[in-house]
Amino acid sequence: MSQLTVNGIRVDDTFAEAFGMRATALTITAHNAAWARQAAVTMTGFATSVIGCGCEAGIDCVLNPDETPDGRPGVRVLLFAVSTSELQKQLQNRVGQCVLTSPGSACYAGLEAEERLKLGNALRFFGDGWQVSKRFGDKRYWRVPVMDGEFVCDATTGLSRTAVGGGNIIVMGTTAQTTLAATELAVEAIGTVPNVIMPFPGGIARSGSKIGSKYKGVTASTNDAYCPTLKGSGNSALDADIASVLEIVIDGLSSDAVAAAMRAGVGAILALGPERGAVRIGAGNYGGKLGSHHYHLKDLLP
Amino acid sequence: MRALVFTLRAVPAQRLDLAPLKPDQLLGLSEGKIAATELQTTRERLCAGDVFKIRMGDATQIRFDGGSERFDHIGAGMSQGEISIDGDVGNQAGRLMRGGRLAVAGNAGPWAASGMTGGTLAISGHVGERLGGPLSGETVGMRGGVVVVRGDAGARAGDRMRRGMIIVEGKAGIHAGSRMIAGTLIVRGRTGRLPGYLMSRGTIVTLDGSDALSPTFADSGVHEFVTNILMASYVQAYSPEIAVMLRRPWRRLLGDMAVIGKGEIFCPPVTN
């Protein structure tokens, strides 16, 4: 594979291939920032990949009290799924089981769009007849009595059909420590970009996958070309000096947001340099035939 | 563009139906046609030109210089633009209003905002009884929009209200929010006897308490409500002082248990 070298780091002349997805956003608030975060973390747990979790979800940003509808500390979370019906199901189950149950929580639409998903309209039945609808202007809320007061929730939230899932950066280094250091730095940089999430643990996936498997019925399997312990097996994409590979997967509410996130991540890795960080950067794709969004690394260099 | 101005020539000899003098009906009309608009409520014909001196202007910005308690139905059915009255108005101001803004600098009579579904009605003075309420034979009162009364409201403000918000910065008469179906009624001053009489759903906020509460309301204690913070944010644009007060803890009373009891009254923590 042809490569560029920037600041001593090899950059593959390749692209990340991403897919159109359905997405929504929520603002979760609570008495304090810790409990708002707790509700968000619980709700976005087990949401690393649509392959096995039904959706991909994560925290977009922390919100100050003056940025939330009820003036309390909050967190904005994003959810992505492959279909509107699956997104609706995941939204309802996750808010119902993880946010409604969290002390002092309230949940609001985090995305304004013409198309809507049911939020409080689906959860209100927990109130068993004691729920109350309240409309202020064009906003409609549901108030559901719970044991610590009331769970307040927007009736609906916005649906985006132009979201993108699967932007990615493959980070390759000579040791596990330097590779992780470079990837952590990239995750931190991407964390400052609005409207994107990195759904894997801490934003990082160590088990990147390829489509399909030798086993019947298995839809995804290990990306053996990037496994350093398989170097020499004949199918490896890794150079002799690569001993560790990590991947950052990025979902965004728009293609521009994903591109901005990848640019921030690549920039952070390149700035760190090869001695303390990665020696090579790549990206995952499927030959360009499956996903409609292509992010070429050479276009994302600082 | 300057406003279309109606200047009162003299106190009218009969009650007037001013419903036709709204942006929806005057847009595109010539001065002659506007002057010929009939306003009488008796057999004696009376046109706009007889009652007012007319200065042509933007028909979406209508101004009345001078008011009268004989000005009935002002802004009735309006859906756009703004009407401002430099004085009092009579019955049913903003009746069935659907949008736009109606501003009354003086007092308003009974049934203001009756059946209103949208827009904003601002009354700087006092308002008569049954603010937002239905007329005889109707089953539902106000169904949307916002009403702000800087003075006092008469009896049964918000009667059979279904949606929207009424803010009374002064006092309210007896039976405020009677037979409420939904919506929000906020009273800054003292509320008369038995607020929420036979209300089924909806919210009444009596910031200064009431003269007497019905025993058919159940006390559910003093709480901090997230909903009230949301309400305060919405009210901020209309009444900043009330918005500040709403953010405090309030006592919640559930009722009216004489009917289905799904309504609520927020009142001061120490009832008086």
Image (spheres, coloured by chain):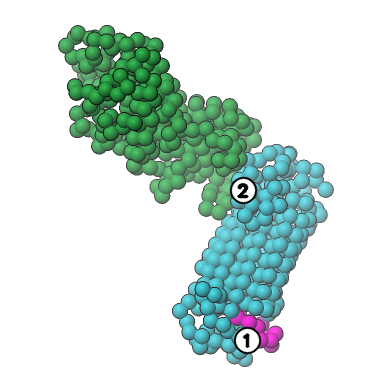
Chain colours: A green, B cyan
Q: Is residue A207 left or right of residue B198?
A: left
Circles 1 and 2 on the same subunit = yes
Identify the residue shown where x is 55% and y is 78%: B4
Amino acid identity at mark 1: Val
Identify the residue shown where x is 64% and y is 57%: B238
Amino acid identity at mark 2: Ser
Q: Report the magenta stretch's main SS.
A: loop
Q: Earlier in the sequence, mark 1 or mark 2?
A: 1
Q: Is residue A286 left or right of residue B168?
A: left
Quadrant in the rendering for residue B130:
bottom right
Q: Counting other residues with Cα less than 10 Å from the Cα at mark 2, is it few (<14), some (14-19), or many (20 or more)?
A: many
**SS for tag 1?**
helix
Q: Position of residue B145 (x, y in %)?
A: 57, 60
Q: Which residue is mark 2?
A: B233
Q: Position of residue B167 (x, y in %)?
A: 67, 57
Residue range highlighted in magenta? B6-18
Q: Is residue B37 left or right of residue B64?
A: left
Identify the residue shown where x is 64% and y is 64%: B122
Q: Position of residue B20 (x, y in %)?
A: 54, 78
Could you tell me how far apart the alpha carbons at marks 1 and 2 are, in whole angstroms? 42 Å
Q: Which residue is mark 1?
A: B51
